Each structure stands twice: as structure tokens, then as C-alpha cells.
Image (tube, rainbow, N blue to C red):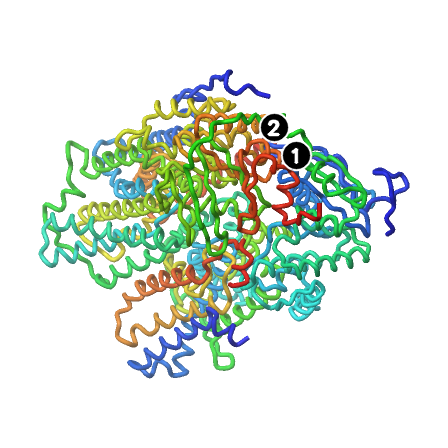
Amino acid sequence: MTAQQAPLADAAMPQPLLALEDVTKTFPGVVALDGVRLELHAGEVTALVGENGAGKSTLVKVLTGIYQPDGGRILLDGRPVAFRTAHHAAAAGITAIHQETVLFDDLTVAENIFIGHAPRTRFGLIDIGAMQARARELLDGIGARIDPAARLRDLGIASKHLVAIARALSIDARVVIMDEPTAALSHKEIAELYELVEQLKAQGKAILFISHKFDEVFRISDRFTVFRDGQFIAEGRTADVTEDDLVRLMVGRAVDQIFPKRPAAIGDPILTVAGYSHPTEFEDIGFSLRRGEILGFYGLVGAGRSEVMQALFGITRPAKGAVRIDGKVRVIRSPAEAIAQGIVYVPEDRGSQGAIIGLPIFQNVTLPSLARTSRHGFLRLAREFALTREYTGRLDLRAAALDQDVGTLSGGNQQKVVIAKWLATRPKVIILDEPTKGIDIGSKAAVHAFMSELAGQGLSVIMVSSEIPEVLGMSDRVIVMREGRIVAELEGEELTPETLVRHAAGISEAAG
Amino acid sequence: MLTRFLKSREAILTGVLLALLALIAIRAPEFVAPGNLANVLNDSAPLIILALGQMAVIVTRCIDLSVAANLALCGMVAAMLNAALPGVPIIAILLLVVVLGAALGSINGLLVWKLDIPPIVVTLGTMTIFRGVIFLISKGQWVNAHEMSAVFKAFPRAQILGLPVLTWCAILTAGAFLLLISRTPLGRAFFATGGNPRAAVYAGINTGRTQFAAFTLSGALAGLTGYLWVSRYAVAYVDIASGFELDVVAACVIGGVSIAGGIGSVGGAVLGALFLGTIKNALPVVNISPFWQMAISGSAILIAVAFNARANRRQGRVILKSAEHAA
Amino acid sequence: MTDTAATERHIPDRLSRPGVRLLRSWEALLLIVAVLIFTANSFASPYFLDAWNLSDATFNFTEKAMIGFAMALLIVSGEIDLSVAAIIALASTAMGAAVQAGAGTPELLAIGLGVGLLCGTFNAVFVTVLGLPSIVVTIGTMSLFRGLSSIVLGDQAYGGYPADFAWFGQGYVWWVFSVELVLFALLAVGFGALLHLTNFGRAVYAIGNNQTAALFSGIRVRRVKFLLFLMTGLMSGLAAICLTSRLGSTRPTIALGWELEVVTMVVLGGVNILGGSGTIPGVVIAAFVMGLVTFGLGLLNVPGIVMQVFIGLLLIGVIALPRLWSRIGARRR
């Protein structure tokens, strides 16, 4: 393919192998895909670029038959198709390397690669010999030296990822989707993966490549498509744009409009962390948080930010390091102790760790504060309702009644309940892990306004976020983490989308 | 290959079983004579067959507590049929009990698959219902040896190549399971469904239908065992094999089948059943009251489950690259 | 953008009046069932509507319900204890052995409750300290506890309990109100208060709904579960005292299969077997329903094993029907 300086929509362009038209997917409380389009061409790599929550993972699931779209069309060779299960998508020649490794720990490598479509003998039994031989071929093809008979449980994360890649290639596919395929790989393995992508291109396959790493996108893709907040933003030839162009398209909106961060009086350090290390998750974390400050933690998914926060909250135990609260060394062994010390954590995974969706709003809000609302261990409902009303009111919660089950609320309102729950404990430090992930714009604004108000009242906030505008708009100071370590601490003039992305992805300054 | 086997659960169990036999041999050498060991194997055959079916169910994250009641019901039907129509050939009876057992098992499977009722509730319920049905069809009467035809009683005892048919049934079931588990898509689907249901959906597996298949299989084996049991002991009544479902679950747990699903092996289930069968047979020989047996299987379950949990403790996510390479 | 500070919309505390909610509840439906069975029984048998006969009928469920209350809390928290009947057997055997050694009633009470507590602790350690699934652990301890009892008891029976020990299972507090019935009522109030009116009860619901979120909210999950297993053990010990006192002997088959009946009672009472919801009043009504069914069928000379069929059908039916109903409803839409 010669670099053809084509305009974005060229009529002379050949028919795409796979095309999405106006595809929509909604979940209760959130529109994950809002009428998006996408074209994949034979023999080309299309990079899909966007922030977290842009809708990329949902798109992958729609394309592989895990989710069914609510609207729009999927065209294969120009003909509309529907994938009701993962089988249908695979049969149509679409295969994916998923971001999370969806494999089976207790099956062998070969079984993992061929589950659902194993080679059979004449008698209809699985042909183990053929299966292992083909597994070995596939693994050799991607330069992975893994024994096909090994149990998956005994492999490291990188090897498991290579198995997932081999699994995707075991289907004779025309469309290969790679969702963050290099996240867990070493340099050498990445180089081999690039080679593989070239081979697949040469075989005329259409490749959808999803990555946060810009160097990869530029190294490997022919075209790009940008999504933002579940919407299609732009597409074009990668050769026609620069890194800065892409960052701008990705981040989009004018940053200062939405974020009402008011300057707050920043006081003395309240929380100081030094030499904080965990055997497998993070190393030598040190920072201090001051009164009235909003401290942003930026990084790619899997950089270890949540793990640091969960250790501070007493869920996991770090191996080394000291935590000082108001200058005094504290050892926190459980969430109960953290709450008693005035540290609270609003987890990222709202459904499984934050809200208790089967319980009413007021019971969620008062759960960590029961000691205060009760007398001699007996509940006092009037006090619970009063406390709930006080904090949910400040967050502009929309609900029919305070005894409504949290599960019946929209995502944004669920998040308000969770934040109200933590504020009701009257903490000194509140850690918000992706506080606006997957919630609508209106709720986002309410959460942001409230964070700002809290900081103004002298509460200290740590905000873990992967959304650049949110980090830039809300934080007084930003710490960037990569691969379990702090790689930068940015303030004032240094805080730009470009510096954040560069530090988080490990792109050298010279590249820009 | 050898080192992998030596580290496996099957190797440990084999070692434990051999140690147990050695211990028994010290006090009663006649116990380890080949002839007696063949007896032990024959006595353990029903437990082996049921444990294999139960393994399939547990591997898919379910449990079947109705197997013993299913066994008793099928056994009663076979016995009553034989008493009423002695001319019906054994092959027809075998076919009948397998189909009936499978049908009873599929009731469990349907309730779990279509209505999403927890397996423990379903099978606790069907367990009592099946027992009650036996009472209703038999009016509480026993079917005794003299009412059964000679052919009916002789079948499990018939010798082929020096081993009784009952033993052969267990061996064939184990062989069939080896093929099923490692060489058929269904066998792999059992493990996928229990090991990682979400990933199973990604691989295009219908997890509910897989669980249904496991229950049906377990039921069919319970039906088969029902006839073998009734004909071997030459008696059928409401309470035969009462409480046997616990032995079956115990055999699986001892054999390393994880109650959380996704883990288990044919060898483990067979060895677990042999372990319990050996203890049951050895107690009278070494002059320990048979009343000890229940406490011993209870302790074995607890030890095995604690041991399994330790062996299968999963690792967390590794973020630091250096840590992964060091590990 | 929304103005967050100024406008505060009013959200009422409650969606509907408590009365309305009560009418639509599972408990209300169950109560209707109980009344229907009661009416049917009184027509079916002339002996049914007699104060003393009815009082006798309560013995069908009082001991099981004592365990049922504690089991309800345990199941709401997402765990289960299948060893309760075996605990009764072991506690009763221990009391029987103590009688042979010359123990008096106070010692028997201490032994009964003590064995229950000990067994509960044993389960609790396996589940909360070692982190093992309660269903396997208690299937194991079910074998172990009953096995220990059968080692001691063999195929013999213990008897010869002191005369004043009979009061617990055979005595009456006033008129037709037996000691067991009064105990049942007191425990119903006690466990109802614990589950519905205290912080502890709230923690039980939170754990059963979402254990991780509960832990993240500062609930001491392990401690709560440990206590629940202790309570279930203790109640099994108490049930052992009542049952042994009522029967006046300890036989190997004592309370055989009761774990199933207790779980059925709890589930029939509207407790979700997967945890997270259920009420003590529901369990109380379920106890009466089961007692009435058993007693009514008994008056009609239906054998015990056939009653078991009814109980099994009841167990599956009460869970299956609502699911079937909602499925049909969903299809129509």
C-alpha cells in the first residue's frame, strides 16, 4: 500500500471489509456508544483511539457478539450481519484479543487456544495430538516459547497474554481485533507482535488496533478513528496527523469550561506517605497531601494507582513504608481502622465495591456511620434519614424516596450515593478512584462542583483519574504513575495534556 | 511429565492410599491380598460411578445432593418391574434405569438452567421428593430377594476376566469419563463453565445448558447404580443408600474436585472413592467399630478442603514488571 | 449546568406507607397460605380445632424454628450451616453420656449449650479464619459431628434423664403454652430485634448483599460471620436440650434430616438462599405453615415420608413460582 494522500471520505475508496453504521449501545444510566461509525479495510491496520470511557471496550464486545447493539448496522462485505453470540462472530471470521485475559486457568495452553473449535478425530473426539501441534505452530508464529501442554495457571501474565493472542489467531479470521495487546508484554515480545501484525496485513486481514500508546499507533496503523464519550469524533490516515493532533482530538472539549475548581486555601500536610512498597504492585511511593488540596493521580490503566489507594485504605498490606496522618505514624490494617483515622476510599468499581445495590439509599449512606446514628447498638431510623438527607441533598441526588433501592438509580446517582456515604463519615482525606467513570455529564458536573466545595471547606482530596480534562481541570497538583512507580509530579505550568500523556506512556521528550 | 505427576493431587492421593494400605497390612496382612483388594474395589464400585457423575456436576459450579435418592428410586423401579414381570431382559432394565435416572437428573438441570435456582436448594428438594415417590410407588413395602429373578440378581456378580460386572461397570465408567473429560467438547465445556463462566461465554459456550448436561449425566449414572445396588444386595426399600450422597461429595472433595468449580480429575474422583471404600472395608478388619466411619469421612472432607484451598490460592495481579520476572 | 448549591429538591423518606409495602410482601402471602391451611385443616378433621391438639402441633416446629432463626441470619449473610442436625445429635449424646456419669439438670444444660457453642466455633474457624466455603465445611462437620455421636452411641440409646429435665420439652408455662412455645416466642422477638433493629443486623444484610462493599464500608465481615456461626451452634445446642427433654432419650437417628427442614423453613419464610434479604417474621409464619401442614397431614394419617415430599415440593415451589411468574411476565411485555 502506497501512502495515498486521500481526503477523509474518498468516493474511490474500496468497500470496507467491516463497517459499523450509527451503532448505539446503552446501559442503565449511561450511553456507552452513541451512534458511532467505524470502517475496517482488508490489509490495513485501523487504530481506535480514545480516553477511558470513550466506548472502545463496548465496541469490541459488540463486534464479537458479547453485546447486542440497540441500534445501527454492522456490515460485513457490505451486507448487514447480526452476532447473537460469540460463536456467530467467530463463524463470521471476527476474532479478538480481549483486554482482560478471558482464559481458563485450569486448562492447558492448547485447550485454551482451541476451546469451542478443537480439531476432531474421525470418531468425533478431540484430536489432542493435532491440537497440540497446531497450538505449537501458532505459538511459534508469534515467537512465544510456551509448552502447549502446560497448565495456564503456571504461566506468568505476559505468557497468558500470548496465549490469548494465539487463541485469537486460531480462528481463521478476516478481522482481527487487538484491545491493548501490548499492555502486558516486554519489548522483545512487542517487537514480535509488530511483525505478526505485518504478516496479518500481508494476508489481507483487516486489523482493529486499540492502544493508549501513541508510539504504537504511529508505528503500526494505517488509519485511525477517534471516539470520545461514546461518540465518533474523527477518522483519517495516520500519516496525515501528528501526535499532538491526536491528543487534541481525543481530549476535545475546552478544559476550563466544565470544571469549576475554585482556588482553595491550601494548608499544612495532612497525609504523608514515604517509601511505600508492595511486593508485586507498587514500589517506593512517596507523596504528601495538604489540607484543602485536590491531588490528582494520573496514569494508564494498570499503572498501580488503585493498588496504592487500596493499601492506604487497609485493604491490602504493603510490605514497607510509612504513613503519617497529621504528623503521627499510623498503621492501617483494615478499612474500619482507616475510616476511624479519617481516611475514606470511594472505589472505582461502583457495582461491586461501592454501592450495595440491593439495599435502600439511606442504608447505603449510613453504613459506615452507624456508630454515630445508633444508640447502644440499636438503629435510629430518624437519624439515619436525617443524615442521608443532609449529604444526598448537597450532591443534588435525584431519587423518588430515600428508601428506594440503590440498584434502581442511574449510574450517576448511584455514584452520588456512594460519595454521600463517605462524606457522612466526616473524613479528613477522601480518595476518589475514577469518580466520574461511566456517568453522564450532568452527574459529572455535580460531582466536580462538590469536590471543589469540599476542598474549599478544608477537606483533602486524592483523585485517581484517567480522564485528562478531569485531571487538569480539578487538580491542584498531579502525580503520574507508570508500572507501579511515580514517574512525575506536575504543577502549574507543567500541567498540560501533552506532558501527562508523555509521562504516563513513557514517551521521551525528544519525540514531541 | 513424571515430575508433573509427582506434584499432582493424584500422586499425593495415591501415596496416601498406599500408606493407608500399608498401615492396615501391619495389623491385618490378609487385607492386602489380591483377592481381598478386588473385593474392596468391587465394594467401592458404586461410589466410584457416582463420584464421577458428581465430579462433572461440581466442576460446573453446581452440586447434586439427590444422587442417592435418585439411585434408590431407580433401584426400586427396577426391582418392582422385575418382581412383576420377571421375563423382561436385563438389557431392557439397564436401559430403563439409565433413562429414568437421566430424566430425574434433568429435572434438577432444568430447574438450575431455566429458573436459575441454586443447585443446593434444587437437589435438597428433589432428594426428599424422590424418596417420597419411592414410598408412594412401593407403598412402603420391601422388594425382597425371593421376589427377584435369578438373572436379575446374578448380573452384577457375573465374572468377566476374573472381575465381577459391577467392578467392570466402574472401570468402564471411569474410562468413558477419561474420554469425555479430555477428548470431547462437552467435557471441556464442563471445566470452562466452572472455571471462568464469563470467559466461557466469550468462547461461545452456553453455560446453563452445560450445567444441565452435567446433571443429566449424574442422574443417568445414579440410575445405573440404582439397579446394580438393588440387584447386588438383593433388596429394595425406601431407605437404601440413605445418606450416600454425602459419601459421594466426600469422595469428590477428597479427590481434589474444587467445590468452587473448574477443577477436578477422573483420577482424583476415583482415588477419593477408593480411599473411602478402603476405610469402610478396613475398619472391621482392624477391629475398629464401623461407627467410626462417618467421623472419619467427615474429617477427611475437612482436611481435603482445607488442603485444596491452600493449593489453589490464586495470585494477585502483578504490576511491577521486575516482580513478575523475579517470580 | 445544574445549580448544585441553591436548589434542593425534596426527596421523601419513604416511597410508600409501610402498611402498603407490608400488604404486598412475601410475608403477607405466606400468612394467607397459613390461614387457608388452618381453615382446610379444621374442616378436614374434627380433632383439629382443639386448644390442646393445637398446642401439641407446635412441637412440630418449635425446636426447628429455634435453629431456623439463627440460620436465617446466617443465610442472609450469604453462608449456610448444614451441620445443625448433627450438632443436635452430638449435644444430645454428650448429655446422655453425662447422665450416665450422674450429671444433674444444670450440668446437662451447660453441656448441651456448650457442645453447641463448641461445634459452632469449629464451623466458624473453618469458614472465617481459613476462608473455606461454608457449604463444604458444614457437609464435612455434619459427617464429623454425627460420626462422633455414633462412635459414642453405637446402636444404643441413652435414657434415664432426671425428672426435672423433662420440664424443657414437656412442661407448660401456663395453660396450653408449653415451655418450648414460650421459648420460641422469646427467641423470635430476640432474633427479630437483632436482625431488624440493630447495627449488627444491618451489617448482616450489607454482607449478604455485597461482601466487598460491606468490607470497604468498614464492616468487620469476618467477625460478624464468626458470631453468626456461634449463634447457630448455640441454638442447635438449645434445640438439642428441648428435643432430648421432650423425647426423654437419645437415639442414633435423633434429628436425622432436620438440616433440610430448617433450611426449607427459612427459605419458605422468604429468605433468599443466595443471601441479602429475608425477615424473621417471615420465618415465624413459615414455621407455623410447616407445623400446620405436618400436623394436618398427620391427622389425616399421611405417613411422615409423604410429608417430606410436600416439604420438598414446597421448597422448590416457593422459589420456582415467583421466578416462573416474572419470566412469563417478561415474555408478555
Residue C106: where, in percent of width, then height? Answer: 11, 47
Q: Check the residue under mark 2 and report the chain it is in.
A: A
Residue B133 shows in this picture? no
Q: Which one is in front, A146 or A308?
A: A308
Using the numbered discs, state the Cα–Cα distance from disc 2 to disc 1 in whole angstroms.
Answer: 9 Å
Q: Are marks 2 and 1 in contact (CB under 8 Å)?
A: yes
Disc 1 marks which residue?
A229
Residue A92: where, in percent of width, then height? Answer: 75, 50
Say left or right for A130 vs C156. right
Which residue occupies 73% across, 46% down? A47
Q: Quadrant of residue C228?
A: top left
**Quadrant assignment for the N terminus of chain C:** top right
Disc 2 marks which residue?
A441
Residue C205: where, in percent of width, then height? Answer: 39, 37
**Quick one: label 2 or label 1, which is nearer the N terminus?**
1
| Looking at the image, residue B42 lies above or below residue B115 | below
- Single out the residue that lies furthest toward the right: A12
Q: Amino acid at mark 1?
A: Asp
Q: Are marks 2 and 1 on the same chain?
A: yes
Q: Which one is in front, A327 or C102?
A: A327
Q: Check the residue under mark 1 and report the chain it is in.
A: A
Which residue occupies 43% across, 45% down? A273
